[in-house]
């Protein structure tokens, strides 16, 4: 009897250990599932943040520089509406004074709403696509030692930037076409707004009419964005390696301005030809 009792006690203890092991395994699996869920939520939040940040940044920058953009367009088309004497006297100050005197100060932001409608999705896709393409390129064989070779990093940033620019421009090109046609209107108003322009183009020219000139645009946008991102990343890395305690805002503004100048220098002639 005593032997049977001892055996029963031993069996009970082994059975209890198995139960505890099962509970621990279940608890571990539950924790792993929770971690995976949290990681997925963080990824989604990161994606939304990248899209929102890119869109807001693009809209804000275009709004701040709208007066200069309007002056640029007026200078580019001035030869179509002015005589030689007027062209010789042309200057930024003279043209700005004319706009304020004849149209009012708010005229500097004419068409800015259409620009924002295009820039929000374009900038969002541009920034998001750049980060995704960059991750994919770093996953390619031979890219494991990124960060150690500056030339390899510049190449990856250049390719990722070019692909991002092409992706964003292709996805938002109908809005870009509408924005350009609305801005090109002078005294004769053919399009009454964004939606009217979209409907009219689809009716008169077909859906493919929304993509007229896409090839020429991509030839300019791809290299332009590639130069912009590669110059920005290179300047920022160089600056932070030499002066790591400088303000992040100062570094971003300076590097962003210089990269914008570099990309616009190569893209300016193409913009003039498009108009």
Image (tube, rainbow, N blue to C red):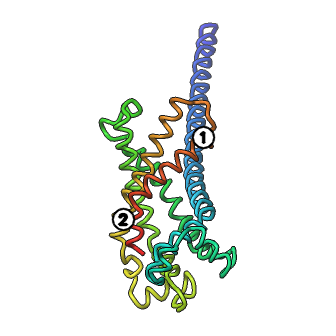
Position of the N terminus, as image quadrant, is top right
**Other residues around mark 2 within 10 Å, as few (<14) / some (14–19) / many (≥20):** some
Residue that protrudes farthest toward the left in the picture: 141
Rendering coords of residue 87 (x, y %): 47, 76
Observer-side mark, 1 or 2, equals 2
Count the marks: how many? 2
**Other residues around mark 1 within 10 Å, as few (<14) / some (14–19) / many (≥20):** few
Rendering coords of residue 3 (x, y %): 60, 8
Residue at coordinates 45% horizontally, 49% vertically from top-left? 229
Camera-side residue of 69 and 27: 69
Mark before the other along the chain sequence, 1 or 2? 1
Q: Which mark is residue 255?
A: none
**Is the residue 119 above or below the residue 32 in the image?**
below
Camera-side residue of 207 and 257: 257
Which of the 4 quarters of the picture holds residue 120? bottom right
Which of the 4 quarters of the picture holds residue 64? bottom right
Residue at coordinates 44% horizontally, 58% vertically from top-left? 264
Residue at coordinates 50% horizontally, 39% vertically from top-left? 236
Residue at coordinates 52% horizontally, 35% vertically from top-left? 239
Rendering coords of residue 17 (x, y %): 59, 21
Residue 141 is left or right of residue 205, and the answer is: left
Marks 1 & 2, CB-CB < 8 Å contact: no
Q: Secondary structure at mark 2?
A: helix
Rendering coords of residue 235 (x, y %): 47, 40
The residue labelled by disc 2 is: 218
**Is the residue 51 above or below the residue 137 in the image?**
below
Q: Secondary structure at mark 1?
A: helix
């Amino acid at each position: 009897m005593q032997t049977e009792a001892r055996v029963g006690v031993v069996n009970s203890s082994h059975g209890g250990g198995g139960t505890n092991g099962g509970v621990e395994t279940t608890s571990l699996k539950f924790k792993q599932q929770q971690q995976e869920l949290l990681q997925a939520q963080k990824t989604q939040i990161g994606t939304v943040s990248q899209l929102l940040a890119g869109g807001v940044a693009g809209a804000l920058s275009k709004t701040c520089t709208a007066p200069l953009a309007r002056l640029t367009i007026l200078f580019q088309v001035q030869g179509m509406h002015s005589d030689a004497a007027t062209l010789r006297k042309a200057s930024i100050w003279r043209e700005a004074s004319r706009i304020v005197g004849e149209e009012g100060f708010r005229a500097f932001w004419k068409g800015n709403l259409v620009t924002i409608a295009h820039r929000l999705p374009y900038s969002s896709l541009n920034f998001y696509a750049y980060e995704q393409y960059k991750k994919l390129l770093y996953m390619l064989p031979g890219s494991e030692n990124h960060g150690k070779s500056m030339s390899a990093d510049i190449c990856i940033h250049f390719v990722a930037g070019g692909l991002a620019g092409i992706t964003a421009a292709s996805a938002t090109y109908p809005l870009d076409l509408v924005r350009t046609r609305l801005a090109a209107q002078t005294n004769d108003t053919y399009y009454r707004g964004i939606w009217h322009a979209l409907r009219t183009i689809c009716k008169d020219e077909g859906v493919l009419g929304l993509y007229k000139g896409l090839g020429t645009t991509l030839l300019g946008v791809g290299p332009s964005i590639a130069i912009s991102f590669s110059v920005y990343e290179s300047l920022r890395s160089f600056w932070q390696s030499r002066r790591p305690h400088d303000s992040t805002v100062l570094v971003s503004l300076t590097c962003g301005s210089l990269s914008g100048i570099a990309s616009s220098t190569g893209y300016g002639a193409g913009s003039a030809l498009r108009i």
